[in-house]
């Protein structure tokens, strides 16, 4: 079981953004690779702290984590679902180097000034429309994506200006002493490499655009507006040391013909005839797993809400399914023939047809309150 992100950073769930940032800096200094050379445990703790900070420093991701826990980011659910364990230290430095404040903090390098800078390709974004049935069961979608990849045969040389670091360092003498600053290399644009051979079909950076089919695994219980991430399926980065960007998948829900969604619960409007409401009946209704039959009791009142437990959508955090709420509406005929009209005129003053709700009958507002609670 994964550790709680708040526990990793040693902060409470009510911690402010500033407290989270301060706690991450403290952990990063404690477990920094420069301070703990060759210590794999320290490196693992460093990665855990980076992963925790990546989620908790983002207000939207933090809100999802507080609501759903780690499950919100499984299967590429918009964060680093697989954690930072598969990333090297340079990836983390490139993403959070600014936490150390520019060129370094506490005597430790921010990662960018040491060794070759690893460029990352841009992310791609697509929309995927899902039915309620897709959301109920989870689904794999094959999508076509046009992404930039390195052309076959392209070759790169180490940049002679920055010697492959991707940065140039400038030392300035000031009244406060010698100040060292770094900036992206003007020759290679910070890539650390220049093109030695470029195929004619490639662009100036040695890239080509091609269509690729990508499989997206979508977990059950996703919601409209959620974003999933497929690592490494964005655009490639130029250069032999580049890291591919990610494919960001935005979830859209298709409107269902008879079911309406409210969180993990579903709503169904059931219309029954006056005779069925009086005599009782058996009715077939839609669910996300197929049709089911429900029993209409004798004397059923219009506005009654029947709750079918567990017939809603699965919870993204794995805590079971929502319910299907069947809203019963007794249909009153608008026209009657002579025989029908005569019957109801005869029954008009009959005591059985006079409204007399029992004390146990709940009001409309009580039923609405119950549905939304």
Image (cartoon, rainbow, N blue to C red):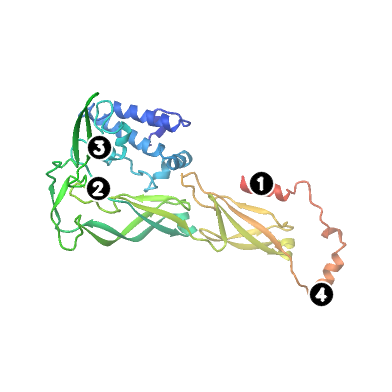
What residue is disc 2 on? 243
- Residue that appears at 53% across and 50% down: 264
Where residue 8 appears, x then y in whole percent?
A: 37, 31
User: Relative to residue 317, is residue 182 drawn left or right?
Assistant: left
Pointer 4: residues within 10 angstroms few (<14), some, or many (20+)? few
Looking at this rendering, what residue extends furthest in the front direction?
Answer: 175
Q: Earlier in the sequence, mark 3 or mark 4?
A: 3
Instruction: Provide the secondary structure element on which disc 2 rests.
Output: loop
Q: Which mark is residue 369?
A: 1
Q: Nearer the viewer, residue 90 or 340?
A: 90
Marks 2 & 1, CB-CB < 8 Å contact: no
**Visible residue check, residue 4:** no
What residue is disc 4 on? 339
Q: Earlier in the sequence, mark 2 or mark 3?
A: 3
Instruction: Provide the secondary structure element on which disc 3 rests.
Output: helix
Q: CA distance from mark 1 to mark 3?
A: 52 Å
Residue 345 location, quadrant: bottom right
User: Relative to residue 225, is residue 32 drawn left or right?
Assistant: left
- Residue that appears at 23% across and 39% down: 183
Q: CA distance from mark 2 to mark 3?
A: 13 Å
User: Relative to residue 51, is residue 201 drawn left or right?
Assistant: left
Residue 39 location, quadrant: top left
Task: Please identify, in this view, whether the residue under mark 2 or under mark 4 is nearer the observer.
Answer: 2
Q: CA distance from mark 2 to mark 4?
A: 80 Å
Where residue 341 appears, x then y in whole percent?
A: 82, 72
Task: Please identify, in this view, whether the residue under mark 2 or under mark 1 is nearer the observer.
Answer: 2
Marks 2 & 4, CB-CB < 8 Å contact: no
Q: Which mark is residue 89?
A: 3
* 32 up-or-down from 295: above or below: above
């Amino acid at each position: 079981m994964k550790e709680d992100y708040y526990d990793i950073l040693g902060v409470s769930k009510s911690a402010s953004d500033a407290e989270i940032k301060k706690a991450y800096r403290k952990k990063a200094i404690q477990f920094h690779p420069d301070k703990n050379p060759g210590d794999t445990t320290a490196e693992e703790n460093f990665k855990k702290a980076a992963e925790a900070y990546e989620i908790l420093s983002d207000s939207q991701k933090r809100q999802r984590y507080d609501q759903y826990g780690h499950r919100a980011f499984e299967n590429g659910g918009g964060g680093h679902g697989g954690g930072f364990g598969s990333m090297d230290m340079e990836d983390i430095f490139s993403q959070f180097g600014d936490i150390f404040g520019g060129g370094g903090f506490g005597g430790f390098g921010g990662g960018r000034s040491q060794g070759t800078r690893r460029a990352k390709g841009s992310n791609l974004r697509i929309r995927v429309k899902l039915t309620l049935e897709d959301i109920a069961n989870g689904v794999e979608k094959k999508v076509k994506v046009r992404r930039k990849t390195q052309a076959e045969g392209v070759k790169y040389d180490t940049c002679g200006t920055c010697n492959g670091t991707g940065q140039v360092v400038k030392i300035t003498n000031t009244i406060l002493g010698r100040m060292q600053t770094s900036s992206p290399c003007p020759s290679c644009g910070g890539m650390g490499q220049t093109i030695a051979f470029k195929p004619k079909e490639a662009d100036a950076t040695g890239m080509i655009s091609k269509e690729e089919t990508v499989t997206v695994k979508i977990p059950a219980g996703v919601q409209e507006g959620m974003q999933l991430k497929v690592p490494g399926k964005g655009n490639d980065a130029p250069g032999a040391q580049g890291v591919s960007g990610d494919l960001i998948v935005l979830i859209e829900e298709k409107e269902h013909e008879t079911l309406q969604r409210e969180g993990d619960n579903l709503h169904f409007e059931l219309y029954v005839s006056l005779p069925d409401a009086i005599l009782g009946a058996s009715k077939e209704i839609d669910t996300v797993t197929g049709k089911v039959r429900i029993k209409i009791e004798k004397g059923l009142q219009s506005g009654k809400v029947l709750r079918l437990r567990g017939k809603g959508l699965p919870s993204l955090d794995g805590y079971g399914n929502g319910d299907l709420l069947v809203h019963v509406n007794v249909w009153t005929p608008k026209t009657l023939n002579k025989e029908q009209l005569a019957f109801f005129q005869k029954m008009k003053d009959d005591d059985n047809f006079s409204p007399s709700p029992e004390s146990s009958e709940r009001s409309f507002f009580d039923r609405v309150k119950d549905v939304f609670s």
